[in-house]
Image (cartoon, rainbow, N blue to C red):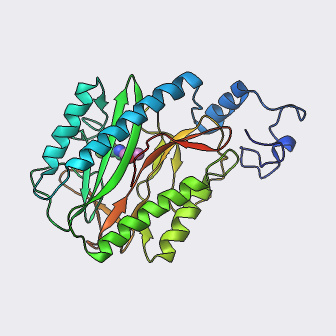
Amino acid sequence: MIGRNDLCWCGSQKKWKKCHFPDPGQQTSTKDLQNLYQKKYGIILKTPEQIEGIRASCRFASKILDATCTQAKEGVTTQELNDFAHQMHLDHNAIPAPLHYGEPPFPKSICTSLNNVICHGIPDDVPLKNGDIMNIDVTCILDGYYGDCSRMVCVGDVPKESQHVVDVSHECLMRAIAVLKPGTPINAIGEAIESYAENQDCSVVHQFIGHGVGIRFHENPQIFHNRNKNTTLLVPGMTFTIEPMINLGLPEAVVDEEDQWTARTVDGKCSAQWEHTILITDEGHEVLTIWKK
Ligand code: MF3
Ligand code: CO
Ligand code: CO
C-alpha cells in the first residue's frame, strides 16, 4: 500500500494525505483505489481471484517458453518451434494469444525474432544457424487469463556483439524489476532501463512498449522503456509486462511492408529482448512468469 507521505497516485506531486487520501487517519479502501485507477487511468487493479487466474496463466506461459527454448537448436526451424509451442497450449486447454491477433491477423502462435528483428517475428521454414540470437515470445490464455513472457536463445557460438546486447537487455529488465513497489512512479522503469543501456553503448526502442496484461492481452498502463514523464504511481493489484527491446545500433524500428508485423532495426544491427509479467503486491512485486536465464 502507498504510505500517507508518499506522492499521490494522481501525479499532482502532492503527498497522498494532502491530495486524494479520503481520510488522513486511514488507508483508502481497495474498492476506492480500484475505482480511482479505473476512472483516472483506465487501469484494472486485479482482485485476489483474478490474480490467482493470472498467476496460473503466467506460470503456464513460462513453462511453454522454457520447453520451447530447449528445442531451439541449430537446424531447427522457427515453424517447428511454433508447432511445438502450439501443441503444448492445446494439450493443456490453453489458447495461444498471438494466433489471429490484431490487424492483419498475426498468422502464428508465438513470435520468433532473430538477430536484427526487434519483435513480432513470424515463424517460418528457415533453420536456425550457428551464431543466431533469437527472442521467443509466448502469450497464453488460460481459463480466460493472459500470461506474457519472452526470452533470448543463443544458437551455438554467437558473436561477442550479439552476446553483449543479449546480456544488456536482460540486465535492463532485472534493473527495472528491482525498482517496482507501491508508490514507485511508472517512469522509474524507463529511467532504470535507458540509463543502463546508454552506459553499455546500446539504444532503447521507443516504438514498442510494455503493457498492462491479465484480463486482456494489452491493457493500460503503457510501459515505456525509455525515459518518459508518466508519474502515475504503482499500486497493489497492477499486473503488467516489462519487455525492453535493446539495440546495438540505432533505436528505430521499421515494420515489414508485406507482412505488417516483423519489426527490424533500421541499420540491420542486432536487437534483443526479455519479458516478464509482474504483479505489484503490498510489499513490493512478484514476477509471475518465472524463467531462469
Ligand atoms: N507478446 C507480444 C507482447 O509482448 C505481443 C505479440 S502480438 C502478436 O506484447 F500478435 F504478434 F502476437
Ligand atoms: Co508483452
Ligand atoms: Co510478449
Taking 83 as reference, is 29 above or below it?
above
Judged left or right of residue 193, residue 34 is right
Taking 246 as reference, is 146 above or below it?
above
Q: Position of residue 109 (x, y in %)?
A: 24, 38
Taking 7 as reference, is 56 above or below it?
above
Q: Position of residue 40 (x, y in %)?
A: 65, 37
Residue at the spot 46% in from the left edge and 75% down from the top edge? 200
Q: Is residue 190 visible?
A: yes
Q: Quadrant of residue 169?
A: bottom left
Q: Quadrant of residue 42?
A: top right
Image mark count: 0
Residue at the spot 30% in from the left edge and 71% down from the top edge? 162
Q: Quadrant of the C terminus?
A: bottom left
Q: Position of residue 88 (x, y in %)?
A: 24, 32
Taking 227 as reference, is 275 above or below it?
above
Q: Which of the four quarters of the rendered structure image does ligand 2 lie in? A: top left
Q: Quadrant of the N terminus?
A: top right
Judged left or right of residue 199, residue 202 is left
Q: Residue furthest right?
A: 25
Judged left or right of residue 248, residue 22 is right
Residue at the spot 90% in from the left edge and 33% down from the top edge? 25
